[in-house]
Image (cartoon, grey):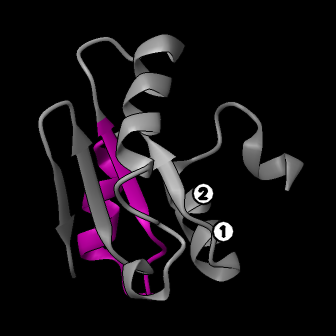
Amino acid sequence: MEDILNSGVEDDRIFEYGANHKIPIITHDRGFGILYYFTQIKPPTIVILQVLSPHPEATNKLLSKSLSQININKPQNYGKLIIISKSNIRIRTK
């Protein structure tokens, strides 16, 4: 797993790792939304956080608020694209 987490690893490799191990991916990178829609494999759960400033404080505040409203580990949420912003949570299916 350390090889996956090193800086500079390609998004598609992280995406594939998440899919193979059924691990949700939480990111600010909207590129994972593109991977989600165009992949040939069953996608993992992708959570894209939309914040004005992706600093840890803003990210943690948004995560804390939203993850109390939605459980990304529930089976019905597996393989979904979840987009979280300050004002709403959108859940998309491929």
Within 10 Å of disc 2 (Cα), the crowding (few <14, some 14-19, many 20+) is some
The residue under the point 66% across, 81% down is 20
Q: Report the residue that reaches farthest toward the left.
A: 87
The residue under the point 37% across, 61% down is 70
- Residue 14: which numbered mark, if any? 2
Residue 67's place in the image compared with 70, above or below, is above
Structural distance between the alpha carbons of marks 1 and 2: 5 Å
Q: Disc 1, disc 2: CB below 8 Å?
A: yes
Report the magenta residues as a range: 30-49
Q: Quadrant of the N terminus?
A: bottom right
SS label for mark 1: helix
Q: Amino acid at mark 2?
A: Ile
SS label for mark 2: helix
- Residue 69: which numbered mark, if any? none
73 lies left or right of 6: left
Q: Circle 1 sits on which residue?
A: 17
Residue 43's place in the image compared with 68, above or below, is below
